[in-house]
Amino acid sequence: MSFTGIIFDLDGTLLNTIDDLADSCNRQLEKYGFPTHPAEAYRYFVGNGVVKLVERALPDSREAHSILNTFIRDFRADYEEHCFDKTRPYPGISELLERLRRDGMILAVLSNKPDAETKKVVRYFFPKDQFHCAAGHKEEFDVKPDPAGVRAILKKLDLKPEETAFVGDTWIDMQTAANSGCFPVGILWGFRDRKELEEAGARRIAATAEELYSILRS
């Protein structure tokens, strides 16, 4: 598949956030049968280590602590990339964008944040103007798989949907891509679920920024 343009979901795909950390950890907790916690709890505990939060959910048993050790091993690498309640690009993303831009790809970003806020966030975290277009939804909580934003970007940049990849980390992103005629590419950082992405329509799935580059340039 040869792409002319690539549209990226903003939160979770390009940026690290505490909400993503909470979502990641809760997915792991559910996987091992532990209680989950609201994002506010992670905002409090992240500076002291998410392990403390997990330990509070554990019964005092050898089996539980064995599971905890597995959980910590699985989650540690992702957790350590979060910067104490600060948002920042995921590891390797800035380099990925620069490589794609050098390759002549047309790059855009879409968010479920309001349009003005999306543009402000993109300018702050990606000051090198790596995107040809950044767009948000008209309503702050519009998170249904609505292709309107994607179609607006396609029209503005004169991109054909069949030559455009949409990269996201949730089933909503994959459905948005499919509904707009773009090629759905899922990513797994944040401990997203591969099966969920596949069932939502992901045609390819990447676990690292390097793997994503290979998919987008294949």
Image (tube, rainbow, N blue to C red):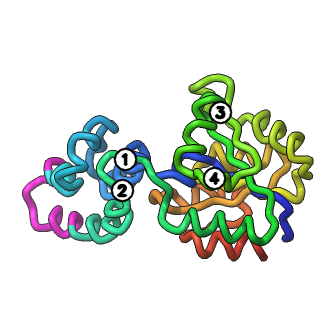
Disc number placed over residue 144 in the picture, else none: 3
The reply to whether residue 53 is visible in this rendering is yes
Q: Amino acid at mark 3?
A: Lys
Task: Kindly identify which residue carries mark 1.
Answer: 86
Label 2: which secondary element: loop
In the rendered image, residue 64, in percent from the top left (x then y), is placed at 17, 62
Task: Kindly identify which residue carries mark 2.
Answer: 82
Residue 60 on the magenta segment: yes
Q: Amino acid at mark 4?
A: Gly
Task: Kindly identify which residue carries mark 4.
Answer: 168
What is the chief secondary structure element of the magenta stretch?
A: helix
Asked if residue 44 lies left or right of residue 22, the reply is: left
- Residue extending farthest top: 139
In the rendered image, residue 112, in percent from the top left (x then y), is placed at 61, 35
Mark 2 and mark 4: span between their CA atoms? 19 Å
Label 3: which secondary element: loop
Q: Are marks 1 and 4 in contact (CB under 8 Å)?
A: no
Q: Amino acid at mark 1?
A: Lys
Q: Residue at x 68, y 71 (%)?
A: 99
In primary-sequence order, the first of circles 2 and 4 is 2
In the rendered image, residue 87, in percent from the top left (x then y), is placed at 43, 48
Mark 1 and mark 3: span between their CA atoms? 26 Å
Categorize mark 4 by other alpha carbons within 10 Å: few (<14), some (14-19), many (20+). Answer: many
Observer-side mark, 1 or 4, equals: 1
Observer-side mark, 1 or 3, equals: 1
Residue 89 on the magenta segment: no
Q: Amino acid at mark 2?
A: His
In primary-sequence order, the first of circles 1 and 3 is 1
The stretch in magenta equals 56-68
Mark 1 and mark 2: span between their CA atoms? 7 Å
Q: Residue at x 21, y 64 (%)?
A: 68
Q: Are marks 1 and 2 in contact (CB under 8 Å)?
A: yes
